[in-house]
């Protein structure tokens, strides 16, 4: 059985349900989910590096997810038809981008896994090991 299509709310729900998470929001509507003071998922405001190539309009719905490694990043962004992407601004940065308007192209399970991996990549070793053990993954 496959999971239902993902929603932006799944990103919020999963990120906020991870242990030791705090949020940092701005007056411009962006929110960052953090563990130990380190962001692992954040909703960013429009920036010059992410725009519609046909209209030049800045994307106003970009979500940034940390990834465990460059290989994980490459695996997510290699298929150009995938909603995962990166920009030159994020070259060498351990993260991938996703437009909120395209999250429905993914299954909920995939989004949950990417959020959990993002948290694991930023949490302390002790917290990550504890979470993995509690979920039978350690």
Image (cartoon, helix red, strand yellow):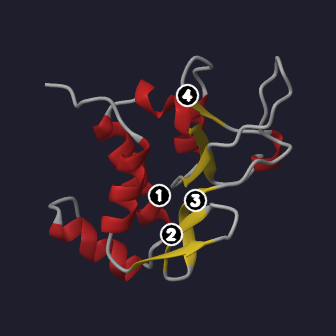
Q: Please indicate whether residue 91 sits to the left or right of residue 131 in the image.
A: right
Q: Residue at x 52, y 43 (%)?
A: 72
Q: Residues within 10 Å of mark 3 (few under 14, many from 20)?
A: many
Label 2 SS: helix
Disc 2/disc 3 C-alpha distance (Å): 13 Å
Above-or-below relation of 119 to 90: below
Which residue has dot 2 on it?
122
Tell me the CA gap for discs 2 and 4: 23 Å
Locate residue 137, reporting x and y percent.
21, 59
Residue pointed to by mark 3: 42
N-terminal of the two: label 3 or label 1? 3
- Secondary structure, mark 3, is strand
Decide which of 96, 25 is in the foreground and name it: 25
If you read the primary sequence from the N terminus, does the residue marked by circle 4 or circle 1 appear first? 4
Task: Write down the residue under mark 4.
Answer: 83
Q: Is residue 72 visible?
A: yes
Q: Residues within 10 Å of mark 2 (few under 14, many from 20)?
A: many
Q: Is residue 38 above or below residue 101?
A: below
Q: What's the CA distance linking mark 3 and mark 1? A: 11 Å
Q: Are marks 1 and 2 in contact (CB under 8 Å)?
A: yes
Q: Which tag is nearer the camera, tag 2 or tag 4?
A: 4
Q: Which mark is residue 118?
A: 1
Alpha-carbon neighbours of circle 1 within 10 Å: few (<14), some, or many (≥20)?
Answer: many
The one of 58 and 75 positioned closer to us in this rendering: 58
Residue 75 visible at all = no
Q: Quarter of the image containing the C terminus?
A: bottom left
Considering the image in quadrants, where does the N terminus appear? top left
Nearer the camera: disc 2 or disc 3: 3
Q: Earlier in the sequence, mark 3 or mark 4?
A: 3
Q: Position of residue 29 (x, y in %)?
A: 63, 61
Circles 3 and 4: CB distance less than 8 Å? no
């Amino acid at each position: 059985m496959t999971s239902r299509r993902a929603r932006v709310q799944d990103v919020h729900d999963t990120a906020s349900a991870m242990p030791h998470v705090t949020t940092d929001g701005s007056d411009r509507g962006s929110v960052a989910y953090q563990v130990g003071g380190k962001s692992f998922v954040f909703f960013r405001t429009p920036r010059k590096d992410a725009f519609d190539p046909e209209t030049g309009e800045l994307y106003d719905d970009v979500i940034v997810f940390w990834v465990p490694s460059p290989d994980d990043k490459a695996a997510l962004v290699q298929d150009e038809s995938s909603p995962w992407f990166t920009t030159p601004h994020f070259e060498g940065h351990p993260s991938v981008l996703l437009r909120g308007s395209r999250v429905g192209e993914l299954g909920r399970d995939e989004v949950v896994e990417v959020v959990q991996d993002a948290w694991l990549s930023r949490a302390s070793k002790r917290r990550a090991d504890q979470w993995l053990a509690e979920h039978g993954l350690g």
